[in-house]
Image (tube, rainbow, N blue to C red):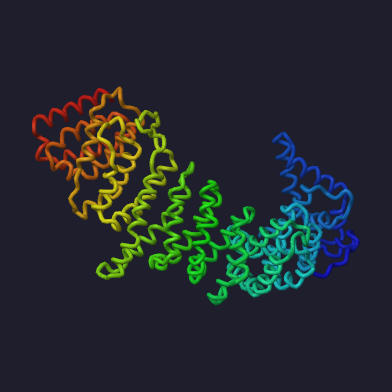
């Protein structure tokens, strides 16, 4: 790009100063005022006493409202004095200009073009300065382009004079100005924003050409490290993708676009991974033709990127890939349901992400909507067609494995094999994860069929000796059973409750001294099951006494009190033919007396 001349800074500042007048310029260049400003900025950022920071802030707000602010800020950014103003002072000057431009309380200077030129000179001068300073200057330029007549075309006409780092940052923040401006009272109406967006997109082809050229430049060609430049290119591309820079592009051209290839290849670079994921996720969400192209890359993503990340427990990489794969799947669940090798590779990859154990549940939780979309797509196929049968048969192993993975992640980790832990509550993150699981568990039950779902939950080969019962597995299976109660009851398939009653008898036989907080978490899940299936459970007279005794034990602790109270009430309602028999009434009277004493 051709270089601008390097004028005398004082003369340059006057020449490019907006219409503030010579008097304002003289005041702005006053050493006393600049010294006061420097002291106030230093106090605001570094003073130890709150009162000093408050006083500095009040003084700076007053300065920002004054007629001298425009000239003072431009003068500081254009100054070539040695030593140059501090980084904090320069940042404040750029920020003050941006705020005055964006605020509806201040009118733009009469000659906005001169302010535009002054800011461009500052962007050129500070192109390799700390990024936050360059960003503030570019934000001021973007705000000015939005508000000034012919601002977009005028800005693009001057861009060839900017060094590449400054141009890249300016192009990044320009599309963002539309969204930022919508979020507050900035005095810009929707028609102006729409005009700004349209004018920006007219320059999109040139911007994409510039980004492609930047992506092909050799390392350190502009003094910026290669990894940093690639990150900036992707940030800029993301801004323009969000603005719709590829609107109207043919599907084949978009899928094969070299910038898309550049973004995909950037997944292998840790420094640019996150923004590359954002670029591709945004593209997939906007353009319905792209999921097919990304689906074809699934074997590579799985083998080269995901499996090593899982082996190394790189949560940042796993979370990013999970986000991208879910976006691809949700954008075209019908494509995934066709069951191609690439689709099955996607399903397998996401199964591994669900099963990945971490301190929170965000990765597993981020996949839930994809699995629901796929399940709904399969269940939405006409039930009588061979296509439905073939698709369901193909994906039954997938959803069976998904149920295993979800049960594993939904376990209360602190419940050990012998339930000797003192955990008294479920972590908030796990509570939310379990709440969000309900829809998917119902879908899995519908796909597998109620008998297969129940069988998978209750036939885990547990030993009958209470000492060897894996209580956290039992607890999570009871939770999964209670979540789909309505679906199972509507199905009406025979249900053998012997396993449930086996555990109910074990738990209700323990004395209060043998129970702890951990044990009552298990009580809670069994209480939910008893309440959900009370009609079926109470149909056998032999079940009534142990169920009532179980509820009596669970009511005594706050963790399980609510679920066991509901279960007790439903048992009394559903076992009306047995409830008035003397042995049963004796138990109910005993429960009442115990709870009166406890209260």
Does residue 274 appear left or right of residue 581 in this picture? right
Residue 25: x %, y % from top left: 85, 58
Does residue 220 appear left or right of residue 462 in this picture? right
Number of numbered callouts drawn: 0
Res 553 → quadrant? top left
- Residue displayed at 68% across by 62% down: 143
Viewer can see residue 350? yes
Does residue 594 appear left or right of residue 414 in this picture? left
Classify the position of the C terminus by image quarter: top left
Residue nearer the viewer, 581 or 372: 372
Residue 54: x %, y % from top left: 70, 40
Residue nearer the viewer, 61 or 569: 569
Residue 96: x %, y % from top left: 73, 54
Res 444 → quadrant? bottom left
Viewer can see residue 248? no
Residue nearer the viewer, 69 or 41: 41
Res 522 → quadrant? top left
- Residue displayed at 76% across by 40% down: 43
Residue 146, relative to residue 397: is it above or below? below
Residue 173, relative to residue 364: is it above or below? below
Residue 268, relative to residue 423: is it above or below? below
Classify the position of the N terminus by image quarter: bottom right
Does residue 151 appear left or right of residue 330 in this picture? right
Residue 562: x %, y % from top left: 29, 36
């Amino acid at each position: 790009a051709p270089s601008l001349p390097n004028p005398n800074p004082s003369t340059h500042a006057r020449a490019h100063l907006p219409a503030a007048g010579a008097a304002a310029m003289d005041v702005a260049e006053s050493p006393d005022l600049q010294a006061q400003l420097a002291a106030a900025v230093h106090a605001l950022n570094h003073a130890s006493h709150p009162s000093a920071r408050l006083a500095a802030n009040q003084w700076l707000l007053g300065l920002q409202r004054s007629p001298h602010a425009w000239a003072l800020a431009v003068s500081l950014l254009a100054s070539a004095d040695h030593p140059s103003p501090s980084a904090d002072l320069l940042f404040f000057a750029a920020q003050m200009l941006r705020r005055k431009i964006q605020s509806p309380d201040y009118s733009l200077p009469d000659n906005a073009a001169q302010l535009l030129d002054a800011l461009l000179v500052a962007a050129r001068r500070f192109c390799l300065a700390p990024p936050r300073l360059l960003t503030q200057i570019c934000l001021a330029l973007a705000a000015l382009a939005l508000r000034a007549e012919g601002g977009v075309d005028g800005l693009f006409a001057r861009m060839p004079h900017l060094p590449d780092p400054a141009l890249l940052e300016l192009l990044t923040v320009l599309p963002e100005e539309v969204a930022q401006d919508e979020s507050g009272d900035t005095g810009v109406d929707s028609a102006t924003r729409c005009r700004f967006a349209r004018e920006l997109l007219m320059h999109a082809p040139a911007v994409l050409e510039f980004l492609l050229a930047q992506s092909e430049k050799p390392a350190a060609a502009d003094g910026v490290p290669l990894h940093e430049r690639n990150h900036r290119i992707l940030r800029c591309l993301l801004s323009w993708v969000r603005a719709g820079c590829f609107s109207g592009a043919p599907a084949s051209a978009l899928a094969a676009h070299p910038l898309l290839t550049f973004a995909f290849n950037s997944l292998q670079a840790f420094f640019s991974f996150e923004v590359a994921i954002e670029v591709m996720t945004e593209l997939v969400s906007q353009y319905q033709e792209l999921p097919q192209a990304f689906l074809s890359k699934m074997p590579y993503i799985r083998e080269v990127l995901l499996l090593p990340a899982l082996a190394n427990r790189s949560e940042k990489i796993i979370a990013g890939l999970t986000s991208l794969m879910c976006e691809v799947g949700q954008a075209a669940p019908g494509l995934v349901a066709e069951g191609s090798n690439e689709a099955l590779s996607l399903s397998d990859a996401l199964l591994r992400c669900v099963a990945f154990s971490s301190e929170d549940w965000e990765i597993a939780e981020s996949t839930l909507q994809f699995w629901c979309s796929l399940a709904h797509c399969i269940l939405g196929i006409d039930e009588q067609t061979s296509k439905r049968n073939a698709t369901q048969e193909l994906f039954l192993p997938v959803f069976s494995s998904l149920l295993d993975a979800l049960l594993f992640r939904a376990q209360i980790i602190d419940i050990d094999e012998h339930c000797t832990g003192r955990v008294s509550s479920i972590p908030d993150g796990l509570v939310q994860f379990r709440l969000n699981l309900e829809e998917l568990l119902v879908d899995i039950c519908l796909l597998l069929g109620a008998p297969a779902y129940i069988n998978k939950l209750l036939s885990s080969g547990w030993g009958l000796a209470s000492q060897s019962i894996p209580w956290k597995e039992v607890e999570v299976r009871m939770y999964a059973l209670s979540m789909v109660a309505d679906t199972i009851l509507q199905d009406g398939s025979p249900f053998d409750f012997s396993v449930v009653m086996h555990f109910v008898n074990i738990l209700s036989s323990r004395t209060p001294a043998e129970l702890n907080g951990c044990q009552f978490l298990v009580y809670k899940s069994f209480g939910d099951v008893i309440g959900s299936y009370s009609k079926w459970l109470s149909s056998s007279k032999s079940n009534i006494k142990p169920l009532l005794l179980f509820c009596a034990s669970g009511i005594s602790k706050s963790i399980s009190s609510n679920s066991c109270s509901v279960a007790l009430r439903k048992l009394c309602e559903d076992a009306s033919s047995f409830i008035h028999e003397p042995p049963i009434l004796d138990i109910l009277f005993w429960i009442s007396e115990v709870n009166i004493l406890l209260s």
